[in-house]
Image: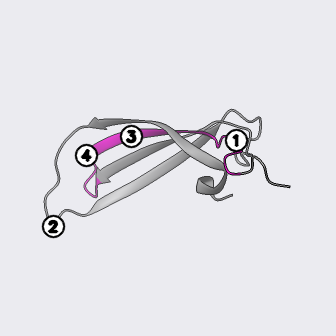
Amino acid sequence: MDILEKQELAGMALEYRRECGRDSVVNSLTTIYSDNADSNRPNSTSSIHYDHLLSLESGPTIVKARTMWRPKRVSNQGTAGSF
C-alpha cells in the first residue's frame, strides 16, 4: 500500500541526539505499527505510526522520530450540484 494514497500525516515527533558531519555515513531504519490486528498489512481504516531511527555507521543515534498517520478524510467539495 502506498501510504500517501490512503493516509495523511497526523503528527510528528523528533528527538535529536547528536549532529553528524558532512562526510558521515548514516544508517536509516524504519518500523511500521498499525492499530489493525495484522500490522504487516495495514488498511485504509487503520491508524499507522512509523518509528524512524537515523544513526551513524559507527553506532551512535543522530535522531529518533515517530510519524503518525490517519486515514484520509473523504471530501465532498466540488461535487455539490453535480448530477
Query: What is the crowding at mark 4: few (fewer than 14 residues within 10 Å), some, or many (at least 20)?
Result: few
Q: Earlier in the sequence, mark 1 or mark 4?
A: 1
How far across and how far down the image is residue 16, in percent? Answer: 25, 38
Residue underneath mark 1: 39
How far across and how far down the image is residue 11, in percent? Answer: 46, 35
Q: Which image quadrant: the N terminus?
A: bottom right
Nearest the camera: 81 or 34? Answer: 81
Q: Tell me how far mark 3 sits from mark 2, CA to CA.
A: 22 Å
Q: Tell me how far mark 1 sits from mark 4, CA to CA.
A: 29 Å
Tell me the magenta residue range: 56-78
Q: Which image quadrant: the C terminus?
A: bottom right
Q: Tell me how far mark 3 sits from mark 4, CA to CA.
A: 15 Å
Q: Are marks 1 and 3 in contact (CB under 8 Å)?
A: no
Residue under the image location 68 percent in, 32 percent down: 35
Residue under the image location 30 percent in, 43 percent down: 63
Look at the picture and state if 57 lies above or below 59.
below
Mark 3 belongs to which amino acid?
A: Ala
Q: Tell me how far mark 1 sits from mark 2, CA to CA.
A: 37 Å
Q: Does dot 1 land on a helix, a strand or a loop?
A: loop
The colour scheme of the drawn protein is one colour
Nearest the camera: 23 or 83? Answer: 83
For this orientation, the residue located farthest to the right is 83
Residue underneath mark 2: 23
**Comparing marks 3 and 4, which lies closer to the viewer?**
3
Mark 4 belongs to which amino acid?
A: Pro
Q: Quadrant of residue 22?
A: bottom left
Residue underneath mark 3: 65
Q: Earlier in the sequence, mark 1 or mark 3?
A: 1
Q: Tell me how far mark 1 sits from mark 3, CA to CA.
A: 19 Å
Q: Does dot 4 land on a helix, a strand or a loop?
A: loop
| Image disc number at residue 60 | 4
